[in-house]
Image: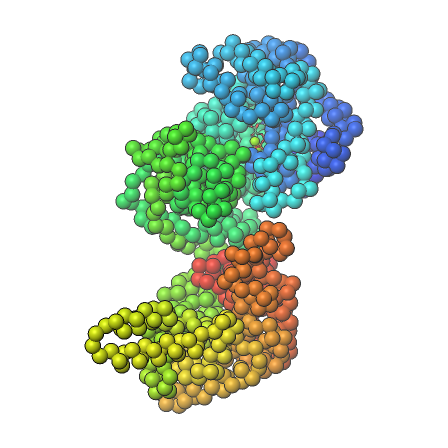
């Protein structure tokens, strides 16, 4: 690969030097597809450009000009020639695709003289001047950074003056006048006249493309998508072909399959008599690709063949840019198409079913973050709401938020914790930060391949485009459609799947599992080695978990069964009881409730292990509110009549609550410490568990109970409680004369437990890493306070790479886990190990769990699909 490299040299594997576009142009050229000739200036030159203070390396321009000779020969034209001028496009091409972020200039090589040559050569003055008009305009905005609106305004005025509705109706005279106006505008703005020297034009354009790498919007995009700053962009210089030559010419964008549904049908848009950005810019509304079949059957047929060939060649769905010049098809770009989660699943499943890729490859192509984003949310009911407009369903999923009309406002409001929907006439790459901040995006103009649509799909965000039936009054900051007016800050709901824009805040619902997802999840289950279990606290959760493929329950938090209104008051009676008998009375009432919960969960989980954690949280979470008690007491005192007994009881309760209060409850009487201080509570729970087990067994259900002791820090705690479990279990089984096997294990969530895991493993059948508490205690960060107080700042300022409560800190907390696993297994070869904190559903953390050889991960039911695929990817 030379630093100025012809498309005839290189291919898709050279993406690092040639950039995505350049590498694929070379690949297509060398596959024999119809690509206009050209060459690529490499990313290495871009890096050099920045190293030497934003200057082109010596001799580079000469090399580029020399490379033009090949184009000149092939096209029988000459760069800058007054009769047979060669025109080129100068196109950016980053290594990682950044749609719409970087700049491109078309029709370069035109000046006051060559435009006449082009007119004569093509016998089409209007066409020649249309090219020149576009060129000056693009050059002005890309090279001189003059805002697009200034040019648009002049065009608008010219159209009004001459009574034209559309750009392509403008006469040659109008175009010539516009060119002069543009040149004046440039001269006023930059103090120099528009360059007539084509070599100077080329240099300016190449430099501008390199400079666009460091534009603010490109920087924002790279930050969001984690693209390295030093990757740089290549520059592609390519012979122009013309879609604006009349009614047998046109330009368009094609997806080889539907990027929203994944359906194996070509999907795209085109415009007749148009050039370049006309299709994606949203100024004219394009036609669906199917209509090309009628308009130009031959070109359509060739395009379909090319599409199939490219898909086969790349073994993936492609996104193709094409232009037709006088009936002849040219391909200008191809890349692996962006697609939403649903389409990604379907395409991966279909390609594997078609035998084009393996199941493992299909699995690796699923972006789990993306999948997670879209697995959720659709409208709860399809009907019964007013609709302001139905636009194009550009990126599926439903979202609601408060309307904002500016990208900056979107960003500000988001930072203030609001949910916003960004509504724009059309979006341009400058709006990227607003799109990132918004829950969803609405545009009034532009098609399915417009900038907003592409970016939203890439981020898995709901988006509705081309809502032409609505009016946006930018002055008044209001949006009107179907007689409904919405102002900034009002709530709307959008459905990117149907294209509906709905006033107000509608209820949203989680998504169902599609057949393709089920298929791929099945493959994931074949491939992965870690078990995937669920955190589920109720029979309803357990059913959901089963449905989402859980192989058991890794964590059932029994305190969640205490939180209902009726139960809570009994729990409170139990806690404030001072006499053993009073406490026992309350516990006796709780027992059947717990037992029936466990029973139902066991039934749902027939044949799978169910891990039940004994009561864990600090007592104060169940204590009656002391202020409320005091108020009641005051009220009683002012009441007439005999209230002595009631008063004494209240006073007693207040005293008792005060006694039980702790200044640091999270480090206080909770977990196994509570179980040791109040043994009746754990005894009741264990009794309930085993009674439930036996009832299920009697009904032929296969139950695999695992009793989990929380917050163990010293092996003696576990010893004591394990004995208690065994005793109670034996007693219950003895009474019922039935036996069942069970396991007793512990959570490893106190650093001391991890440090002494060898000892602990001798009394434990399993370890379940409670990474929430383990992270809290290893860092010494209060989980409830850290996020709001300093963690965000820490992450922002790179003091920490991630929020450790979201992504497992592999270096610290992870080291404890790794060590505990090794020591535990050394002492107890039968030990099983797993993770049950929030991290069990986090991609990076799952990769870590695989690396250190955990037996299972456990996460919330809704995360299960993601975790199953992540676990498979971790194994591959
Ligand atoms: P982007 O990366 O923003 O898509 P491109 O470099 O692909 O920018 O250029 C945008 C559009 O300009 C293309 O889709 C195509 O329509 C048009 N274009 C670029 N190069 C040429 C060319 N050599 N001939 C005709 N049209 C071109
Ligand atoms: Mg572009
Ligand atoms: Mg392109």
In the image, taking residue 269 as reference, residue 633 lies left or right, namely: left
- Splitting the image into four quadrants, where does ligand 1 fall? top right
Which residue is more in the foreground, 434 or 358?
434
**482, above or below 203, in the image:** below
For image coordinates 39% across by 63% down, the residue present is: 544
**Residue nearest the observer in this picture, 278 or 686:** 686
Name which residue lies at 48% across and 33% down.
Answer: 427
Q: Position of residue 866 (x, y in %)?
A: 50, 57
The answer to whether 286 appears left or right of 53 in the picture is: left
Q: Residue furthest left?
A: 641
| Quarter of the N terminus within the rendering | top right
Query: On the rendered image, what quadrant is the C terminus found in?
Result: bottom right
Outermost residue, right side: 58
In the displayed structure, would residue 52 be above or below residue 675?
Answer: above
Query: How far across and down, in percent of the image, does residue 580 sit?
Result: 37, 87
Is 846 placed left or right of 617 in the picture? right
Quarter where residue 360 is shown = bottom right
């Amino acid at each position: 690969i030379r630093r100025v490299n012809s498309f005839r040299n290189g291919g898709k594997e050279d993406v690092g030097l040639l950039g995505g576009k350049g590498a694929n142009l070379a690949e297509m050229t060398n596959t024999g597809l119809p690509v206009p000739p050209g060459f690529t200036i490499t990313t290495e030159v871009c890096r050099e450009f920045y190293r030497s203070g934003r200057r082109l390396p010596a001799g580079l321009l000469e090399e580029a000009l020399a490379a033009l000779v090949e184009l000149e020969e092939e096209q029988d034209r000459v760069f800058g020639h007054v009769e047979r001028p060669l025109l080129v496009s100068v196109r950016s091409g980053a290594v990682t695709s950044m749609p719409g972020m970087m700049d491109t200039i078309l029709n370069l090589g035109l000046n006051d003289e060559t435009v006449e040559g082009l007119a004569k050569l093509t016998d089409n003055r209007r066409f020649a001047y249309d090219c020149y008009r576009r060129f000056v305009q693009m050059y002005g905005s890309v090279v001189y950074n003059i805002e697009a609106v200034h040019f648009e305004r002049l065009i608008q005025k010219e159209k009004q003056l001459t009574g034209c509705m559309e750009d392509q109706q403008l006469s040659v005279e109008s175009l010539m006048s516009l060119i002069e106006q543009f040149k004046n505008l440039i001269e006023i703005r930059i103090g120099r006249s528009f360059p007539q020297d084509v070599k100077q034009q080329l240099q300016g354009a190449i430099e501008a493309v390199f400079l666009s790498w460091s534009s603010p919007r490109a920087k924002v995009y790279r930050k969001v998508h984690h693209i390295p700053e030093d990757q740089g962009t290549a520059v592609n210089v390519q012979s122009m072909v013309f879609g604006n030559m009349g009614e047998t010419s046109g330009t368009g964008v094609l997806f080889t399959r539907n990027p929203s549904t994944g359906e194996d049908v070509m999907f795209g848009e085109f415009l007749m008599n148009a050039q370049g950005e006309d299709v994606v810019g949203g100024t004219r509304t394009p036609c669906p690709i199917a209509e090309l079949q009628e308009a130009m059957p031959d070109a359509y047929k060739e395009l379909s063949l090319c599409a199939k060939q490219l898909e086969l060649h790349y073994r993936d769905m492609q996104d193709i840019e094409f232009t037709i010049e006088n009936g002849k098809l040219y391909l200008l770009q191809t890349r692996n198409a962006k697609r939403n989660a649903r389409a990604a699943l379907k395409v991966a499943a279909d390609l594997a079913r078609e035998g084009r890729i393996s199941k493992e490859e299909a699995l690796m192509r699923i972006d789990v973050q993306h999948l997670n984003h879209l697995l959720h949310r659709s409208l709860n009911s399809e009907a019964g709401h007013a609709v302001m407009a139905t636009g194009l369903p550009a990126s599926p999923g439903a979202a609601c938020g408060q309307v904002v009309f500016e990208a900056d406002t979107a960003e500000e409001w988001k930072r203030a914790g609001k949910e916003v929907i960004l509504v724009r006439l059309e979006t341009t790459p400058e709006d990227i930060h607003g799109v990132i901040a918004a829950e969803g995006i609405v545009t009034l103009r532009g098609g399915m391949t417009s900038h907003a649509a592409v970016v939203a799909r890439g981020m898995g965000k709901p988006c509705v485009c081309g809502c032409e039936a609505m009016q946006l009054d930018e002055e008044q900051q209001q949006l009107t459609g179907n007689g409904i007016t919405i102002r900034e800050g009002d709530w709307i709901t959008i459905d990117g799947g149907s294209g509906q824009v709905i006033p107000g805040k509608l209820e949203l619902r989680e998504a169902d599992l599609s057949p393709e997802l089920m298929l791929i999840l099945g493959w994931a289950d074949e491939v992965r080695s870690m078990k995937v279990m669920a955190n589920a606290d109720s029979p309803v959760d357990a059913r959901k978990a089963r449905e989402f493929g859980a192989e058991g329950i890794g964590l059932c938090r029994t305190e969640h069964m205490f939180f209902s209104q009726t139960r809570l008051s009994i729990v409170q009676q139990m806690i404030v009881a001072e006499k053993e008998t009073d406490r026992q009375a309350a516990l006796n009432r709780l027992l059947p409730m717990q037992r029936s919960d466990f029973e139902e969960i066991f039934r749902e989980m027939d044949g799978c292990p169910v891990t039940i954690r004994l009561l864990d949280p600090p007592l104060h979470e169940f204590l009656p509110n002391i202020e409320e008690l005091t108020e009641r007491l005051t009220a009683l005192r002012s009441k007439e009549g005999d209230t002595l007994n009631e008063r004494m009881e209240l006073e007693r309760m207040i005293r008792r609550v005060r006694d039980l209060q702790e200044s640091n409850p999270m480090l206080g009487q909770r977990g196994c410490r509570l179980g040791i201080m109040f043994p009746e509570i754990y005894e009741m729970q264990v009794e309930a568990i085993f009674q439930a087990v036996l009832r299920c067994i009697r009904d032929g259900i296969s139950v695999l109970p695992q009793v989990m002791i929380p917050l163990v820090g010293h092996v003696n705690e576990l010893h004591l409680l394990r004995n208690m479990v065994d005793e109670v279990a034996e007693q219950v089984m003895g009474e019922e004369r039935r036996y069942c096997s069970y396991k007793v294990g512990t959570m490893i969530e106190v650093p001391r437990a991890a440090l002494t895991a060898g000892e602990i493993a001798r009394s434990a059948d399993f370890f379940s890493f409670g990474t929430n508490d383990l992270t809290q205690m290893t860092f010494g960060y209060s989980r409830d306070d850290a996020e709001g107080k300093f963690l965000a700042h820490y992450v922002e300022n790179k003091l920490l790479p991630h929020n450790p409560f979201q992504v497992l800190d592999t270096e610290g907390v992870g080291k404890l886990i790794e060590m505990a696993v090794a020591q535990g297994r050394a002492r107890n070869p039968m030990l099983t190990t797993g993770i049950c904190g929030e991290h069990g559903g986090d991609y990076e953390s799952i990769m870590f769990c695989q690396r250190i050889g955990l037996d299972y991960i456990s996460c919330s039911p809704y995360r299960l699909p993601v975790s199953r695929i992540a676990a498979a990817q971790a194994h591959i």
